[in-house]
Image (cartoon, rainbow, N blue to C red):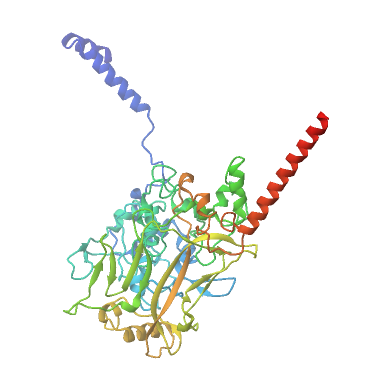
Amino acid sequence: MKSRLFSRLARHWPGGTGLLAALLLTASAFANEPPAVKLNSTADHSKFKELQGPFSSGPELTKACLICHTEAARQVHRTKHWTWEFLNPENQQRLGKKNVINNFCISIPSNYAFCTSCHVGYGWKDASFDFKSEENVDCLACHDTTGAYRKLPGLAGHPPYQDTEVPAGSGKIVKAVDLSKVAQKVGKTSRDTCGACHFFGGGGDGVKHGDMDSSLASPDKDVDVHMDATGLDFTCSTCHQTSSHDVPGSRYTPVALDKGGAHMRGKEDKSNPATCPACHGQTPHKGDGKAAKLNDHTDKIACQTCHIPAIARGGVATKMSWDWSTAGQLSPEGKPIIRKDAQGRVIYDSKKGDFTLGENVQPEYAWFNGEVTYTLLGDKVEKSDGVTHINKIGGNAGDGKSLIWPVKIFRGSQPYDPVNKTLVTPHTAGNDDTAYWKNFGWEKAIETGMKVSGAPFSGKVDFIKTDMTWPITHMVAPKEKAVGCNECHAQGGRLDKIEGIYIPGRDANHLVNLLGWLAAGGTLAGVTLHGLIRILRRKN
């Protein structure tokens, strides 16, 4: 058959035989190729009939996920991402987002429907939320790969199921999420999924942490040498290696000093995998001379101190202070106002007060041993103390557990009860008449919030200065951009306020230096004189 075809083709189209031969060879080559296959997953979720949809709600979709992933929801139920609660074993403080107060958006009770847009669940709008419901677990919050999944403040952790105007009256429409399309493309967590909440903590991009903002979605090497999108391209889970949906690493009990070695594959190691030594070991600098000297620093200096020279380096400003006492100013027409700086960044909002912002901010430094103590609702505070520490990190030069860490200290002024002498939990977000962002009345807002929190409120409101301390651990610069020796070993340098340690260059004493030079000079003079005498005596 083939020979007859070639004969006819050669007779009528002499040059066509070569082309036909090439086509047959190509087809033959393709026939030997293995069929197309996804290499980044062992399952193509678009082929699962359970995920064809349509789905009318997140919980309905979760039921479909749990048909195969039978243990997933109950694993999530055991994590801080679900409970928003954590009992500190060191001091028995009950912490977690559900319980702590901060000096950003202040607190969650009475504001659940807005704050839980970052919860890995559906429907947490008040204290009646069912934490035992498996279908309330939001699988897509962490496993979306499309970038089309979005949860809106005010919807109690749900995505928009219909086109929604946000904010109301703005004319800006957020499209409804097509749950089946997202579900058919689920995959591993990514910087985008983690960052959807963690980059925007405190109410906006880069607001809270300073070392985490949207620039880490696709950073270059100078912003973060590990996450460099064209280099190592680490995801969050590369370091925060998750087991049974539990993500290691805690803001409440962080590991300040890791004395262990690098984790080894196949060897069980229950220590935190998200520390620098967990990969780099105790002698991270390879070689002799300068490398050995740098390794000598690791018993006193956290790796981050040298390798994170500044925060907010990716072009996104971080908030450095927040003054709630100036909130509530309105225009002559009685409307809320917003003021911006020369770069177009908001520095005043009637709903929130005044802000200061910073980019490429040099961290402050402190001894840190991993202990963090919070001022909680009900703890007594005194305005006369000057500043109330919302959280306070422990550590000193002599406890054997501390290293010198870089920190962001966020300073603010926030409402408190001057009669009961406690911090308060105002009801800020919402469209009801008691929400501060609706009526700009602190008394009603705090009365509502404290009632939800189950705490007393005198009806009086004043403002108290506060600060929060955030150890810095992201935005690791390449070694070429690390802090230079002379930036610390100098008077007035980065570590100028660190006590309890002798730092050459910073702690130079003129008298000691003079005595040292005199001793060295005297020794040199003595040796020289001795040598001359021996030479002269040999000649004689």
Residue shown at the point (16%, 11%) measured from the top left:
12
Left or right: 187, with 10 as reference point: right
Query: Closer to the camera, 8 or 444?
Result: 444
Image quadrant occupied by the C terminus: top right
Image quadrant occupied by the N terminus: top left
Left or right: 277, with 329 as reference point: right
Q: Is residue 245 visible?
A: yes
Left or right: 413, with 435 as reference point: right
Residue most extreme to the front: 540
Query: Dividing the picture into quarters, in which one does residue 399 lie?
Result: bottom right
Query: Closer to the camera, 200 or 32?
Result: 200
Left or right: 435, with 511 as reference point: left
Residue 418: image location, x then y, percent: 42, 87
Q: How many marks?
A: 0
Residue 375: image location, x then y, percent: 49, 77
261 shown above or below 535? below
Query: Closer to the camera, 179 or 102?
Result: 102
Query: Dividing the picture into quarters, in which one does residue 170 lie?
Result: bottom left
Residue 144: image location, x then y, percent: 36, 55
Residue 502: image location, x then y, percent: 62, 59
Q: Is residue 64 visible?
A: no
